[in-house]
Image (cartoon, rainbow, N blue to C red):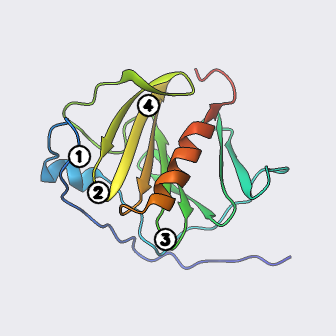
Amino acid sequence: MGILYLRQTSPTKEIAVVEPTFAFPSPTPKMMESIIIPTNQPTATPISPSPTPPADSQVYENEDYKFRLTYSNNRRIYEEKEGQGLRVTFYSSLGNIAVHMGKTWSWQHPDRKLSEEFLVDNEKTFIFENEEQKIIDFEKGEYKYSIQCIHKNQSKIKEECETIVNSWQFMVEVE
C-alpha cells in the first residue's frame, strides 16, 4: 500500500457567461463568479467508494451530509473543501459532475425558488440549465445541495447526470 501525495496548486476557476435555456432570469456576471466549474485537472486526493456497488457503477456515501448516490465506475472522485462546505467532483475527461453541499448555497441566483415540478428524494428543486451545464439545487434540514453537471451538450454526460440525480437518497433524516 502506498500513499499518494498530490501537490496543491492554486485552483483554476473557469467563469462562463451563459444564457438559460428556459424561463429563468439571465445570470449576472456577479452570479457567474460564484458558480464553480471544476476544471479537468483534479487537485485533491481521491477517496474510496463504498463496498458492493451495482454492476458497472459505484456507490458514493457521505456520512457528514447524510446521502448516497450511484455513479459510473469510469469516474474518479475528488473531495475538496468549498467555503464552509464541501465539493465532491465525479471526474471524467469528457465532463465533470460535481455535488456542492453546505449550510449556504455554493452559487447565487436572484430568483431561486424551489418547486415540486422535479423532486430529488422527495425534496423540491430549483433547476438552472444552459448548453454547457445543468445545476439542480435542493435542501434538506440545514444543508443545501447543488448537483452540477458540466455536460457541454453531450448526451452521454447528460444521461450520467440524470442517473446520479435519480439515484440520490438521504441516508437518515437530516437535522
* Towards the viewer: 30 or 126: 126
Residue drawn at point x = 49 percent, y = 71 percent: 94
Q: Does residue 83 sit above or below 63 in this rendering?
A: below
| Quarter of the figure with residue 84 | top left
Type of the residue with mark 2: Glu
Reading the image, the residue beneath label 3 is 94
Rounded to the nearest whole Å, what is the CA distance between mark 2 and mark 4?
21 Å
Rounded to the nearest whole Å, what is the CA distance between mark 4 and mark 1?
20 Å
Assign a secondary structure to mark 3.
loop
Q: Disc 2 vs disc 4: which is toward the camera?
A: 2
Residue 138 - label: 4
Mark 3: few/some/many CA within 10 Å (<14, 14-19, 20+): few
Q: Disc 3 vs disc 1: which is toward the camera?
A: 1
Is the residue under label 2 in contact with that under label 1 (CB below 8 Å)? yes
Residue 21 - label: 1
Q: Does residue 98 sit above or below 120 in this rendering?
A: below
Rounded to the nearest whole Å, what is the CA distance between mark 3 and mark 4?
26 Å
Rounded to the nearest whole Å, what is the CA distance between mark 1 and mark 2?
7 Å
The x, y position of residue 98, in whole percent, is: 49, 53
Relative horizontal placement of residue 25, taking residue 114 as reference (left or right) = left
Q: Which of marks 3 and 2 is nearer the N terminus?
A: 3
Q: Which of marks 3 and 1 is nearer the N terminus?
A: 1
Q: Which of marks 4 and 1 is nearer the N terminus?
A: 1
Residue drawn at point x = 35 percent, y = 71 percent: 12
Assign a secondary structure to mark 4.
strand
The x, y position of residue 48, in whole percent, is: 74, 59
Q: Earlier in the sequence, mark 2 or mark 4?
A: 2
| Quarter of the figure with residue 170 | top right
